[in-house]
Amino acid sequence: MNNRYDVVVIGGGPAGLASAIAARQNGAKSVLIIERDKELGGILNQCIHNGFGLHHFKEELTGPEYAGKYIDEVDKTDIDILLDTMVIEITPDKMVYCSSSIHGYLMIQAKSIILNMGCRERTRGAIAIPGTRASGVFTAGAAQRYVNIEGYMPGKRVVILGSGDIGLIMARRMTLEGAKVLAVVEVMPYSNGLNRNIVQCLHDYDIPLYLSHTITDIVGKSRVEKVVVSKVDENRNPIEGTEMEFDCDCVLLSVGLIPENELSNALGIEMDPRTHGPIVYENMETSMEGVFASGNVVHVHDLVDFVSLESETAGMGAGRYVSNGEVSKNRFVRTINGDNISYVVPQYIRKDNVEKSVELSFRVRRPTQQVNIVVKDGDTIIAKFKKEHVIPSEMEKISIPKILLEKADKELVVSIEEDA
Amino acid sequence: MRELICITCPKGCHLKVDEENDYKVTGNGCPRGAIYGKKECTHPTRVVTSTVKIVGAEIERLSVKTNGDIPKEKIFDVMKELNRVVVKAPVHREDVIVSDICGTGVDLVATKDL
């Protein structure tokens, strides 16, 4: 433990592990990971199901195994680790202030910082479900931690709101542990989870999925006793007369994730209202020179494999920054979300810092079949990609070769065009 | 012809399995889809991931998995068996916790170092 490091990584989940290793391999002589939990690995530790690592390790791993492989890699290096340590503030002079159970109050001077804080779940308050304040309402991720790490069951008869992957995974998990999952309720007309999870988590256990439905009341004095579920119209407003009641003692919410950016906001880096994460350049550098960010703190990913990949870019960026200094901002283009696209990451690309190609990640707003992903600068078409179907729950990635990128002058507008 | 969604990877290919033609699979993006399609129509299997009680570790539960597919109808037998298991730390990833669980020929292994 020192009080000066080339690179300080905030967060020891999948993003932090990958960016720390990449920073060390690309020029940083000293790297520190600061993690608030008692162990490295982040949320992967509670994601005990399999399906991780097919892209990155070319094999199917559980969350703890995926994390374990990275932790083994970190252990082989001289990267320092601070566990049970909470970062309180980061300042523009790259001082990291934190509080540690072992070391007390710490002030650490970094040359470069990588923000890898991940995201957190939206709660009941964020979606304002009417009803009493009875106990038994949990976010799906909190329930997952109770069951898989701490060994508690949060309820016996369960209704799950939201059909994102965490909701689906928890439907199966609660069923396996002996609970009865009465329903998964989804306000949209389609599920936001992966198809494979609908099959292996719901169909396998005959758990009904109610699309275009939502919870309109939670009833119960001290503990949840029942919920009322109603059908919604195309504007997502509940339709009177369609109410169904479910007797349950537990409601799990899987209603979205938000990047966790209190530290980024206090630091004063530029944020993107579309992603709720920092604005980043092609190497995942934020608006503040030498401060990088990657993973779910930038935009919420579906697959951890892509968090690792993006974090390698951030780590490489930080490593090169401490060894070679600042990147020239002379020639840059901005990425813009066009038709049927909700955001594009990175938001800025410095053309001189692109070696072979640049990856753009984005999400569509609506499910669409037979499309062309079109990248334009004004009327000039820079690139075009055909795709069978696109859906909001799947992050799309395209790669723009440097030769094509050179054709762009000011901006890259990414849009979805339906095949005529 | 049976229509399935492949669960082998997050891509979720839409498979068509021809039951009258030796379970010939179409619509698969990779060879694993063909294997899954045939298996799902003849004897469906799953990997079970769960936890067992651990003592002497920082946390209460050790994450485990069946080190291969088991018949789908044995899932709850395996879960029942897991409830009886108590492990002592230290445990390492890939350590066998229960060998040949429920006579499936598949081992239950740890997925975490604790």
Image (cartoon, rainbow, N blue to C red):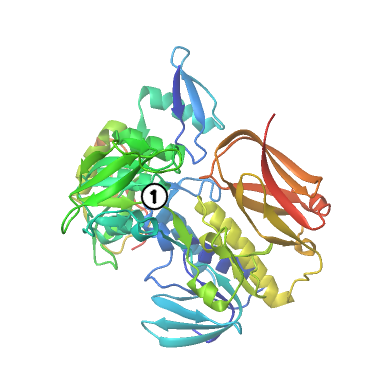
Q: Which residue is mark 1?
A: A166
Q: Is residue A416 above or below residue A333?
A: above
Taking A240 as reference, is A324 left or right? right
Q: Quadrant of residue A336?
A: bottom right
Q: Quadrant of residue A27?
A: bottom right
Q: Which of the two residues, A349 or B31, is positioned nearer the viewer here?
A: A349
Q: Position of residue A263 (x, y in %)?
A: 50, 74
Question: Does the image show residue A141?
Answer: yes
Q: Quadrant of residue A309?
A: bottom right
Report the quarter where the C terminus of chain A lies: top right
Mark 1 chain: A
Asked which secondary structure carries label 1, the reply is helix
Which residue is at the far left?
Answer: A221
Q: Is residue A173 above or below residue A318?
A: above
Taking B63 as reference, is B15 left or right? right
Question: Does the image show residue B100?
Answer: no
Taking A251 as reference, is A264 left or right? right
Q: Which of the two residues, A184 or A240, is positioned nearer the viewer here?
A: A240
Q: Is residue A270 above or below residue A308?
A: below
Residue at the location (65% across, 45% down)? A339
Q: Is residue A64 above or below residue A240?
A: below
Taking A210 as reference, is A2 left or right? right
Q: Residues within 10 Å of mark 1 (few under 14, many from 20)?
A: many
Q: Position of residue A135 (x, y in %)?
A: 21, 59
Which residue is at the far front?
Answer: A240
Name the amino acid, label 1. Ile
Residue at the location (56% across, 45% down)? A365
